[in-house]
Image (cartoon, rainbow, N blue to C red):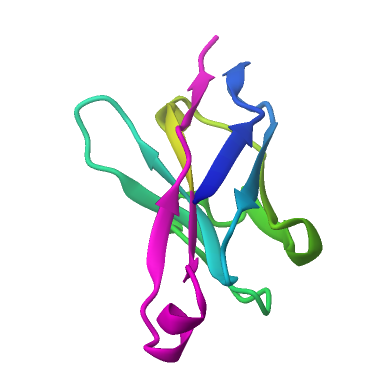
Amino acid sequence: QVQLVESGGGLVQPGGSLRLSCAASGSIFSINAMGWYRQAPGKERELVATITRGSSTNYADSVKGRFTISRDNAKNTVYLQMNSLKPEDTAVYYCNARGYSDFEAFRSQYEYDYWGQGTQVTVSS
């Protein structure tokens, strides 16, 4: 089983910065893409940013130029540097890892999504 453990959330003033981290542990054949999603109260979960094993990135338009995603493949860890935070960035942020659970899954190209428990980010003065 794979576990994703997030850290780094908290309360910050508008214009401030936070850095989220997410470490994957457990038995998994390979992790392909990793990413961050968020869910604000009363809203659906939305993509924030993703990064492939080869470091290709994708960002939501609302965070482009302010957030930076990165990863350390050796540590199975993904980071999200959040700068110039706005009140509308307030949400629970979830780490995601997509990969093959074992060799059979790899052979059949069946990817599985793993999720962290979420970390709260609150941007408020």
Find residue 107 and report its horizontal and vertical position in percent.
44, 90
> Where residue 25 sits in the image (x, y, percent)?
64, 49
- Residue farthest along the top direction in this orientation: 125
Q: Count numbered badges in the picture.
A: 0
- In reply to whether residue 119 is colored magenta, the answer given is yes
Task: Please state which of residues 65 and 67 is positioned toward the viewer in this rendering.
Answer: 67
Residue 27 % position (x, y): 59, 58
Q: Quadrant of residue 54?
A: bottom right
Q: Residue at x 55, y 43 (%)?
A: 4
Can residue 67 be seen at all in this image of the molecule? no
Residue 70, x across and y down, in percent: 70, 58
Residue 33: within the magenta? no
The answer to whether one can see residue 104 in this image is yes
Please tell me which residue is depicted at 52% across the width and 56% down the height of the picture: 35
Q: Is residue 108 above or below residue 2?
A: below
Q: Which residues are magenta?
A: 96-125
> Residue at the location (43% across, 82% down)?
104
Quadrant in which the C terminus appears? top right
